[in-house]
Image (cartoon, rainbow, N blue to C red):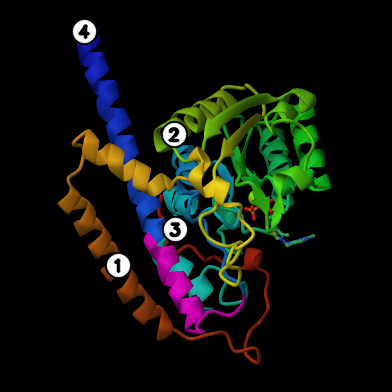
């Protein structure tokens, strides 16, 4: 048996390792999204670009705790979670830039990408459609006798007002499926503030109404996000039924890159949920001497270089030719070159 100080130090080491791993996905998502914004402004991306700046700590916490064989249905602000679940820089860029070699073969824009066979679902809509889908997939797994699968998805504060949210969460609660649903309360649905979106005091109160376990957390605090979301995933896996995790934060960019977010009340930016989760995570890394300032700069530099190389490669790749395209559904082809385990 391990002496308790031994156990303590191992637990501390694993918390540290997990924090650093999560930070690196967050940082990769941030740098990649900065590049996506600049590609959008230079006219190289067709369609909209919707980013997750300020929401990376919450997002990564779900992606990092799901395992191979689980189901993950991310939304538009989940680049960090996607990377933690196994998505790559190359496949992200191939989708945004319309490369035929990407997972969606250049047909679907930006965030509508995934590898459904790997449990990584391509987003249909940001407004709740993924919840019933994940619940249905979990039911199907149960019918096949697969019981330890967790399904993770997310919703915004605005999305909690939709019919799909209600139907999905209600069915999940009745069937007690292992659903982990993160609510990213970033205070706005596009420009509509919380006060015009729902009348309950706090979104986590909805958990009681549906009969599911609810958690409330500070979405800017990576340590808290990892701990709470990790617990929710574990509880769902052990048969605890649906878990509703409500995080307070602020998106630090517009709804999309076309939006300047001028409607955001400055009081939000000054409040605790207006803090930048990436900067806070960096402060912790430095304060605890887990990583040095120069290591942080080296990581960022290496990432930027990798991204530049990937952009140059993808820009040389073919885009789909409508005259030659066979228009087969994704389910008809095997596309799994880059998806890592
Ligand atoms: C039926 C429908 N109406 C409007 C939209 C456009 N739309 C997409 S996301 C969104 C706001 C969602 O707000 P919220 O759920 O809080 O998520 P956030 O954008 O803040 O992450 C809107 C209005 C849409 N996709 N579908
Ligand atoms: Mg919102």
Marks 2 and 4, how far apart at CA: 26 Å
Image: 124 above or below 138? below
Q: Are marks 2 and 4 in contact (CB under 8 Å)?
A: no
List the residue tagged with mark 2: 226
Q: Which of marks 2 and 4 is nearer the N terminus?
A: 4
Q: Earlier in the sequence, mark 1 or mark 4?
A: 4
Q: Residue at x 60, y 47 (%)?
A: 186
Q: Residue 339 carries which label?
A: 3
Kindly state the secondary structure of the residue where label 4 is placed.
Answer: loop
- The percent position of residue 35, horizontal first and vertical second, equals 41, 70
- The span shown in magenta is 31-47
Give how far across and how far down residue 159 sits, in percent. 72, 48
Kindly give the residue lying farthest to the bottom in the view shown: 323
Q: Distance between the residues labelled 3 and 4?
A: 40 Å
Q: How many angstroms separate mark 2 from mark 1 (CA)? A: 26 Å
Task: Depth check: give the residue in front, 94 or 203.
Answer: 203
- Left or right, 261 with respect to 35, comes to right
Q: Is residue 199 visible?
A: yes
Query: What secondary structure is found at the residue carrying circle 3?
Result: loop
Lower sequence index among marks 3 and 4: 4
């Amino acid at each position: 048996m391990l002496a308790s100080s031994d156990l303590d130090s191992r637990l501390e080491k694993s918390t540290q390792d997990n924090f650093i791993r999560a930070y690196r996905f967050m940082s990769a998502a941030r740098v990649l999204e900065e590049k996506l914004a600049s590609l959008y402004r230079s006219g190289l991306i067709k369609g909209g670009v919707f980013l997750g700046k300020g929401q990376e700590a919450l997002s990564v916490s779900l992606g990092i705790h799901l395992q191979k064989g689980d189901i993950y249905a991310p939304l538009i602000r989940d680049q960090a979670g996607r990377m933690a679940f196994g998505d790559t820089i190359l496949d992200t860029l191939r989708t945004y830039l319309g490369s035929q070699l990407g997972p969606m073969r250049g047909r679907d824009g930006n965030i509508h990408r995934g590898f459904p066979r790997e449990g990584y679902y391509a987003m249909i809509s940001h407004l709740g459609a993924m919840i019933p889908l994940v619940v249905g997939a979990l039911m199907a797994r149960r019918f096949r006798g697969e019981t330890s699968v967790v399904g993770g998805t997310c919703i915004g504060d605005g999305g909690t007002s939709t019919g799909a949210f209600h139907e999905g969460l209600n069915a999940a609660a009745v069937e007690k499926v292992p659903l982990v649903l993160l609510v990213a309360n970033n205070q706005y649905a596009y420009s509509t503030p919380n006060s015009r979106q729902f009348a309950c005091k706090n979104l986590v109160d909805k958990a009681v109404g549906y009969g599911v376990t609810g958690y409330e957390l500070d979405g800017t605090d990576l340590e808290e996000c990892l701990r709470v979301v990790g617990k929710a995933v574990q509880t769902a896996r052990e048969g605890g039924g649906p878990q509703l995790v409500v995080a307070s934060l602020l998106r630090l960019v517009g709804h999309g890159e076309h939006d300047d977010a001028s409607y955001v009340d400055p009081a939000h930016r000054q409040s605790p949920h207006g803090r930048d989760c990436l900067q806070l995570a960096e402060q912790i890394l430095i304060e605890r001497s887990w990583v040095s300032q120069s290591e942080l700069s080296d990581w960022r530099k290496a990432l930027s270089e990798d991204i530049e190389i990937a952009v140059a490669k993808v820009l040389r790749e073919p885009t789909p030719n409508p005259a030659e395209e066979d228009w087969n559904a994704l389910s008809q082809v095997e596309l799994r070159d880059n998806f890592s385990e």
